Image (cartoon, grey):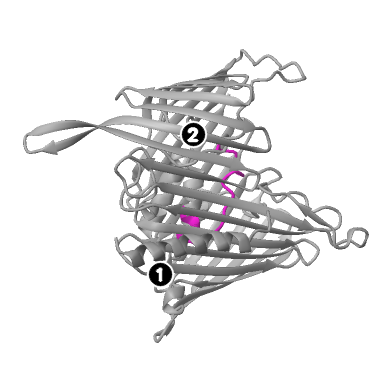
Amino acid sequence: MSKDRHEKEAGVLRSSVIAAALFALEGAVLAAPLSESKVFDWWDNGIITAEEATEILDLLEEGNQEEACLLAQTYAQETCDETASGKTRAGSTLGKISSGKKSAKTPTRPSLTPHGYVDWKGRIDSTGQLESHHTELQVQFYRYTLRLGSQELLAYKNQGSEAYFGDVSTRELHSQIPLDTLWGTALLYPFGNFHVAGLLDTAKTTQFRLGYGRRGIASVEAFYWHGFGNIQQTSDSLQTHTHSLGMQTKFPFGQVAAWWQHGQEFPLIKVQLYGSEKKERDDANAGKTVSKAGQNGAGNSGPGGAVTYSWRTTAYIHREEFPRYARLSKTIQRSRFWGSQSLSVKAPNLLDTRVSANGTLIEPLDADTMAVRLKLGAESGPEFLRLSASATCRDAGSNCRQTDWKGGLNLTPWELWNLGASARVRHARPEGFSPPHLEFSSKFTDSGQSYTKFTFILPKCRPRDDMRMRSEFLISGEYLDISLVCTFKDVHRLHLTPLRGFAEAKVRF
């Protein structure tokens, strides 16, 4: 690799660090969790392609909210809070591992009554047939958790100690970088502020970790991997050893991980930084600033309606090769540098105004140019009438030759009934504006979380050319959740032909 290339890559790394510092407002991400219905919305709206939507849906089906959210930022320029869904985020437990010290309060005895859930998910293709589906069973009893289905795992946890047998991956190994699924045994044992952990799988892959952490302050962990691989040479197959090592750390405003495999030119690096800052606007606390670095929830705005600034920066850096057991999304695999930056401002006292900016910077492995996509959006208005607008520059490197403009409104004439409308047009130079993409929706919500929503979609503005309908149903109860999202085509011909769909049923016991 030439000297100029090295200098250019070093400049990219410096630029990303500077960008993170410029946006350092310490914050909570003001966003909602990612769901299949949102992915269908972007897909039907033409914001993402079928391949991109499938990639995000696959990650959601696996329960990998973090990587799905990263792809949402890349493809749809939308920020989501992957921790708000209640699903455990990969690497989120680093720094939260118990120190092994006894709590001042006597811990309650875990329940001996088995409890858990059965969850079924399925995707429907354009023929109305099941494209993919899986069933998951989770049972908790005493200090044990049993999962069967897409993951077969028996887990045991007791005062910071952890033991796993079965399919172990990112969550069980507390990795900030997504991992392949391995079949084996993983253990973790804390002593004081330190902890040791290890893995042994059926292919004789081994991992050893040593970490130190102070609860609520910071933590650091070093890890080592050893595995075996086969290299085919003519008619012979040679078995080789692979060695890799790395380090990951977590602190109040972010986390950083680096992983290098022997023989590779450059390590795989992942950086996540986030933060928020609240400024009270009431007279008694004028000018008062409250910082909450590293917290991902927006929090209560307070009686004075504090203005909340929040930001998040995520970056992946690697070369043609990366460690064997890392499992990265396709778009990140194909990128030498992948960076995403989001910034949002929320002002409750100013008609509950919310302004957001999202940017993605990608340098592909097979190109020397960088792709930069930018989006600026705003939402404001009283509760009964919310107005929104956004502009997306699809490629800043080409001086925004293609720009998407979108406007919308949400009307709530009654507490449980919502009406919505939106229009999106794409302007390209020198072609001009494309026909507007229109959507009209009606949503009814009961007193709980259940709702019914119908959205009529006009991709080319005129109903006689093409008209689609997306129906969404969610029934949420104490013991049963049922969700169904389906998009129909040929509605203008009075035919409801399925185009794509998703269904989920969850029973708790």
Which residue is at 37% across, 69% downward?
Answer: 369
**Mark 2 secondary-structure assignment:** strand
**Mark 1 secondary-structure assignment:** loop
For residue 503, above or below residue 479: below
Q: Which residues are magenta?
A: 71-88
Residue 50, position as x, y percentages in the image: 37, 58
Q: Which mark is residue 466?
A: 1
Which residue is at 40% across, 87% downward?
Answer: 430
For residue 152, above or below residue 28: above
The three-letter code of the residue at mark 1 reads Asp
Q: Is residue 86 magenta?
A: yes
**In the depicted view, which residue is nearer to us: 209 or 285?**
209
Name the residue tied to disc 2. 222
Location of residue 228 (image quadrant): top left
**In the depicted view, which residue is nearer to us: 102 or 249?**
249
For disc 2, the neighbor class at 10 Å (few under 14, some 14 to 19, many from 20) is some
Residue at far front of view: 3
Is 243 on the left-hand or right-hand side of 400?
left
